[in-house]
Image (tube, rainbow, N blue to C red):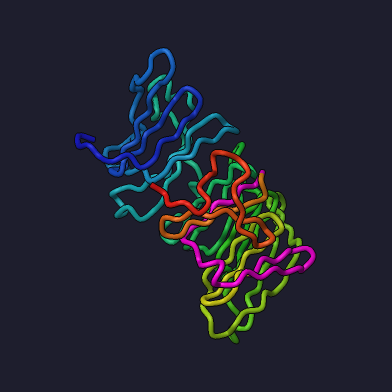
Amino acid sequence: MKKRSKILEIVAAKDVIFALAASGVCVAYLRGQRSNERLCFLNVSPYEVIRSLFFNKASNSIITVSVYKHDNFSSLNCRSTPLEYIRRREPALGFSLFETESLRFPGFVEFDDVNGKVLTYSAADKVYKVWDLKNYTHLYSITDDNIHEIKISPGIMLLIYHKASCGSHVPLKILSIDTGDVLKSFKHQLHRSRKMDFIEQFNEKLLVKQEHEALNIVDIRTGERTEVSCSQFMTPSAFIFLYENQLFLTFRQRTVSVWNFRGEKVCPPFPELLLCGMRAS
């Protein structure tokens, strides 16, 4: 805490601003009439390194995800601290979350603000669990050694399984995020000799791209498929889905592009996204 460090993340939570430094130190400031007043450090131990922050609007609290020196910084520890305690400069009054889970790498925790859920993965038990973000109640568990990845969208979860041994397809399941019930199971056909670039989900649309192959946009309910040639759509480094506008952004090197789900590159329909085809500064 005695050394300056770059700021990695800034989170605004009502009248409190949190700044997380690369060193793992997190500081809370009060904004408003007493602007820039430092309230407290969120690190409740000198050996705590905070990795990320999440503002839980449902409980009006800040969640910190930390690692500690005593286990070589290998396990994630979550703590919820109401903003009321932060304003009173009493961050130690926060309480631990998911203590029953072993979140040692490659275990993880993911907060989903849209659906009001938390997804944890305990690598030791190979169990995925879904929790209610309002009160951290455990809702259901998913135990399946063949799951490769889970993607979350409004109302649903996509379970992506390891490719079939023959390499001809990848099994997929769509689950209700609220109950864990299977809504649909299906297989997406693949080119055997091509590696998988990505599988992404946006509501009822599935985006699948293999190396040197066209982008496939698949409607999960109807099976309708749209292809975008690899010369038009090159594999991006990141996505951002714009739920209200039914569009998605792709980032490749320093170029940002906007696409619709007909596979067309479009100009953004609102001023703040006038980035299409431009180089980021």
Residue that sits furthest to the top in the current view = 33
Residue that sits furthest to the left in the current view = 2
**Residue 188 belongs to the span the image colors magenta:** no
**Residue 220 belongs to the span the image colors magenta:** yes
Q: Residue at x 53, y 44 (%)?
A: 274
Q: Is residue 132 visible?
A: no
Q: Residue at x 36, y 38 (%)?
A: 20
- Range shown magenta: 216-244
* Above-or-below relation of 218 to 155: below
Q: Quadrant of residue 270?
A: top right
* Above-or-below relation of 166 to 62: below
- Pick whichever, 99 or 6, lies toward us: 6
Where residue 118 appears, as percent x and y from the top left, is 57, 47
Where residue 53 appears, as percent x and y from the top left, is 44, 40
Q: Is residue 173 visible?
A: yes
Q: Residue at x 34, y 26 (%)?
A: 40
Q: If the image is split into quadrants, where does the N terminus sit? A: top left
* Above-or-below relation of 224 to 195: above
- Pick whichever, 73 or 240, lies toward us: 240
Left or right, 184 with reference to 61: right
- Pick whichever, 94 or 226, lies toward us: 226
Where residue 91 appears, as percent x and y from the top left, is 40, 28
Residue that sits furthest to the right in the current view = 222
Q: Residue at x 60, y 82 (%)?
A: 191
Count every numbered label the image shows and give the total.
Answer: 0
Left or right, 54 with reference to 19: right
Where residue 62 appears, as percent x and y from the top left, is 48, 34
